[in-house]
């Protein structure tokens, strides 16, 4: 099977900060690796998920029944998953290693051979055995505007923080899933499919304009993913957006993720941003609750029915002028 060129990030050199934060929240619970992705139809058409059993037959999406072992052709992590690997331990002293080979007597193979030993200093190596981890794919529905498929990917293995090799094993699991599917995350080992799916669903709280600070503060307490800096940003944005005359202010948080904050001006005109990771504010024109589930990468790559105003210069003035023009 030829290698498939994929448009997504394929691996991590270390555990991502978002994963470390999630592990802290889980307080030592065993975890498993899973994710939910909104996969553009074109990626499926191009065969990017065929190696793990996802393809179209006509207009029908076919998904493998049962877990699939990612083939070696998927990339280096799939190869390591099947073949294992070793790496030099450059922080440890070198050791002597002897190599042996046969050579002809007096340069003439017809006169027999003798063994020659050759010793050199080499790094000690850490050997990792094959894991043969498998990926189970579940089709959860159709994406906004029918531009893609909502797919849940689960790695079967469970990772226990009590294991001395926990971080190394977890990084391997994350990279196996990331390389083959374009997504990865950690969940409690007993998380239900609904809880994994909820990682892409945003639970919105709606505030009328003029809501008191105390009400916002109580809402913050129900959002453990909202940092102190995030709270400060929300209160700043609230003043900006309320001054533009919205119908309502909205604040939401996905399961185990950062907060989203914005304002609804009409059913087809909404302004919002991801408080933790965004460097821009977005103006949406339709199905904003569904579009808000998308990652920044998915939104920029796969959808075009929005406006994006970066947080540079007088972006607040540009936002006010743009919304005023759209409101007519």
Image (tube, rainbow, N blue to C red):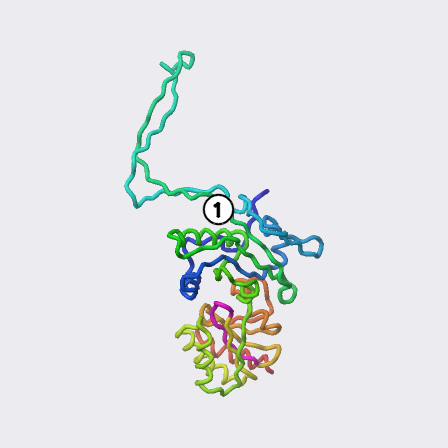
Q: Secondary structure at mark 1?
A: loop
Within 10 Å of disc 1 (Cα), the crowding (few <14, some 14-19, many 20+) is some
Left-right relation of 126 to 35: left
Quadrant for residue 73, please give it: top right
In this rendered view, identify the residue nearer to me: 224 or 298: 224
Main secondary structure found in the magenta portion: strand
Residue 1 drawn above or below residue 252: above
x%, y% of residue 137?
59, 55
| Residue at the top extreme of this rendering | 111
Q: Which residue is mark 1?
A: 131
x%, y% of residue 283?
55, 74
Residue 256 drawn above or below residue 138: below
x%, y% of residue 287?
61, 72
Residue 119 drawn above or below residue 165: above
x%, y% of residue 308?
53, 70
In this rendered view, identify the residue nearer to me: 146 or 200: 200
| Residue at the right extreme of this rendering | 58
Q: Residue at x 46, y 42 (%)?
A: 84
Q: Is residue 256 magenta?
A: yes
Q: Is residue 245 magenta?
A: no
- Region rendered in magenta: 254-264
Q: Residue at x 48, y 72 (%)?
A: 259
Quadrant (top left/top right/bottom left/bottom right) for the C terminus: bottom right
Quadrant (top left/top right/bottom left/bottom right) for the N terminus: top right
């Amino acid at each position: 099977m030829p290698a498939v060129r994929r448009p997504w990030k394929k691996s991590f050199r270390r555990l991502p900060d978002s994963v470390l934060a999630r592990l802290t929240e889980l307080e030592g619970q065993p975890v498993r690796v899973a994710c939910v992705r909104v996969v553009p139809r074109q990626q499926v058409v191009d065969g990017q998920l065929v190696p793990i059993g996802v393809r179209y037959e006509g207009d029908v999406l076919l998904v493998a029944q049962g877990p699939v072992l990612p083939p070696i052709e998927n990339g280096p992590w799939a190869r390591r998953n099947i073949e294992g690997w070793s790496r030099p331990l450059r922080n440890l002293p070198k050791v002597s290693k002897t190599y042996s080979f046969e050579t002809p007597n007096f340069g003439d193979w017809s006169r027999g051979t003798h063994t020659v030993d050759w010793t050199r200093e080499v790094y000690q190596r850490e050997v990792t055995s094959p894991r043969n981890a498998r990926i189970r794919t579940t089709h959860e529905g159709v994406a906004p505007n029918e531009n893609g498929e909502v797919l849940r990917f689960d790695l079967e293995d469970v990772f226990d923080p009590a294991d001395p090799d926990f971080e190394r094993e977890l990084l391997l699991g994350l990279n196996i899933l990331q390389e083959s599917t374009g997504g990865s995350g950690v969940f409690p080992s007993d998380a239900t499919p609904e809880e994994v799916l909820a990682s892409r669903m945003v639970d919105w709280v709606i505030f009328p304009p003029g809501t008191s600070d105390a009400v916002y503060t109580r809402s913050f307490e129900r959002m453990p993913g909202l940092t102190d800096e995030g709270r400060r940003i929300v209160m700043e944005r609230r003043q900006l957006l309320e001054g533009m005359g919205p119908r309502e202010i909205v604040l939401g948080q996905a399961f185990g993720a950062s907060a989203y904050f914005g304002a609804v001006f009409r059913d087809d005109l909404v302004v919002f941003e991801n408080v933790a990771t965004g460097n821009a504010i977005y103006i949406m024109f339709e199905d904003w609750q569904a579009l808000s589930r998308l990652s920044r990468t998915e939104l920029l790559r796969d959808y075009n029915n929005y406006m994006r105003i970066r947080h540079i210069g007088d972006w607040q003035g540009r936002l006010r002028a743009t919304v005023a023009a759209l409101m007519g």
